Amino acid sequence: MKNSNLIKEIVNTGRLYKSVFIRTADLKTKSDIKPSEKNALMELSGHKELSMSVLNKKLSVSKQQLTAITGSLRKKRYVERYTDDNNLRVAHVRITDEGRKALKDTYSEAERKLSNKLECLSAGEITELESSIKTLKKLLEKMNR
């Protein structure tokens, strides 16, 4: 099969990346934000507002999951959900100031935990890792279009 070795490396690296970085950043924190909620807040933080259907596509979750995520975030007052004035069938979501603060606090905790993981690397290795991650991000964004 074409690219078989590459696909094996992607799968194995993805598993390792998740173990080292994602699980470390998402370990139980003081924050009351679940990983799925954090992803929604991160997406919303870059926009004034998003329709539920656009947010659904960006997060790649089911409509039921998105309803649960935004419902939980609304209860915490991290997002506001409202209907479009021109089309009552369209719902929009936007992050609140409280949501931005909670997301910032979550980033601070993740930064502290990930900094501990990076301590075993030399300055040169840190630079190499940063460059590699930037390259990987660029390629993944191209593949995700």
Image (spheres, rainbow, N blue to C red):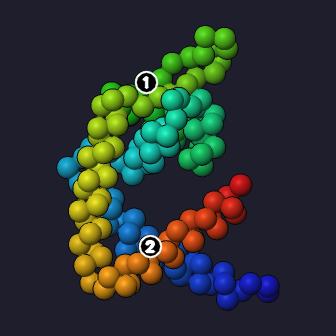
Q: State left or right for residue 2 relative to residue 141.
A: right
Q: State left or right for residue 39 relative to residue 56.
A: left
Q: Classify mark 2: residues with Cα within 10 Å, few (<14), some (14-19) or many (20+).
A: few
Q: At x 51% / y 29%, what residue is drawn? A: 48
Q: Residue tagged by mark 1?
A: 80
Q: Nearer the viewer, residue 141 or 2?
A: 141
Q: At x 63% / y 13%, what residue is drawn? A: 88
Name the quarter where the N terminus is drawn: bottom right
Helix, strand or loop at label 1? It is: strand
Mark 2 and mark 1 in contact (Cβ < 8 Å)? no
- The amino acid type, in three-letter code, at marker 1 is Glu
Q: Quadrant of residue 57?
A: top right
Residue 95 coordinates in the image, percent (x, y): 42, 31
Q: Residue tagged by mark 2?
A: 130
Helix, strand or loop at label 2? It is: helix
Q: Relative to 15, is 124 above or below?
A: below
